[in-house]
Amino acid sequence: MKLTRTAVHQYPSGLIVSLDQFLVSARNTVNVKLVLGMMDKYPVQLKDAYLRSRTIECGWEVMRPETSIHTFIFPADITRNMDAVIKTAYKEQTYPDQLEGRIKNQGAVLDLVASIDPKFWKFSRAFPGLSTTFYAVKNKLRSWLEDRKWLEQDWLRVEADVDLFGLETETSGLSWDAVYERHQTLANEVIAKFATSPLSLEFATPSGKGLISFDNIVGGVCNGWLKTVLWGFYLEYLAGVMGGCYVLLTLTTSVGWPRTPAIPICFTKVVLQSVNMKANHCGIIVAQLHYVEATHKLLVFAYMYEPLIDDDYRDDMENVWNGVTNGEKNVVQEGLRRFVERWQKSSQLQTCHRSN
């Protein structure tokens, strides 16, 4: 008679995975379907309808950070409400006196703590943010499934005219049957990336200047939206292939222009400025530079491209190029033109020697 052997695995007592630890694991796990299944079963507290009418109280307390990061999440609406209450309290309440050194040495900190009657739990300022991140990651994983479903369709039956990208997709000059087969091959290559890439995985351009995480790619394959972060990554890749190209990303116009580059401007052929018009609508300004070595002059030719070719966006594009001034002609916001001029002044053009 064949005996059945049974192995018993005993987990350590008190083994707990807090929400922040679970989110780190979720973003670093390749098996997306497994993670999504775990998130569907993750405990949700404060679901009772009567709790939605309860007041959320918030105040400064001395606490240990680990005591208010729990192993469950809130419903999305309570998460938003608690986050708003904590932010309001942070602005309006007086910051208490600093803790004494002996208390800090015991791991205690001052933090805003929120609670809802009945006060079974207390929640730190970070917890609503973690709960919000939970829902964001879950939505991203669902987008992953939609992307996979779209990629796994039979591309031999899909009529797609992508002659514009014929060179990049290696379909130029091929018969329609060969083009369909090439599309299927490309889809399989992307599917392989989806099957082996956790959300946290980062892709870099060959130059190392462009960096993007996989979770910024997921969701854009199926619906076709070209997000700002993807747009910037593509420009950095293009710049690395071209050489002599300097890229300025969309956020430049909102967070401020970078310092003047150390390399002399005469060694740069093109400056690319990404421009965000509205939501997912982007344009680009191309400043072509031509250094005349005989006269030590720099010629600049500006080209503005907006895909809808809509005159309503022309002023927005010109503001990015020329900058914004007030009624007294004082510069309120620097433009790409001013950035190039500043770069030119800092460069010693007389020391530039190259063939154009």
Image (tube, grey):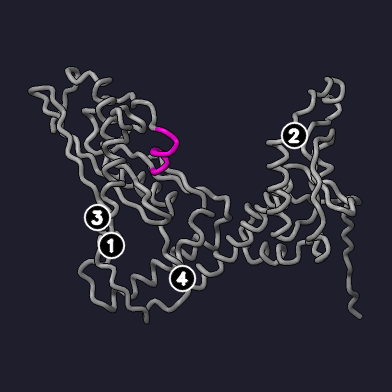
Amino acid marked by disc 4: Leu
- Residue carrying label 1: 165
Image location (x, y in percent) of residue 1: 92, 81
Say whether disc 1 or disc 4 marks the residue closer to the N-terminus. 4
Q: Earlier in the sequence, mark 2 or mark 1?
A: 2
Labelled pair 1, 4 in contact (Cβ < 8 Å): no
Q: CA distance from mark 3 to mark 4?
A: 36 Å
Q: Residue at x 83, y 35 (%)?
A: 61
Q: State the residue lying farthest toward the front.
A: 327
Q: Secondary structure at mark 2?
A: loop
Q: Is residue 275 above or below residue 291?
A: below
The first of marks 3 and 4 along the sequence is 4
Q: Which residue is rendered at x = 40% and y = 38% of the image?
A: 252
Label 4 SS: helix
Tell me where the magenta segment starts and ends, as one range: 250-256
Would residue 251 be counted in the magenta stretch? Answer: yes
Is 113 situated left or right of 354 in this image? right
Residue 311 bears which disc, if any?
A: 3
* Circle 2: residue type: Gln
Q: CA distance from mark 1 to mark 4?
A: 18 Å
Q: Pick the residue in front: 221 or 325.
A: 325
Q: CA distance from mark 2 to mark 4?
A: 52 Å
Q: Which residue is mark 2?
A: 93
Q: Which labelled disc corresponds to residue 151?
A: 4
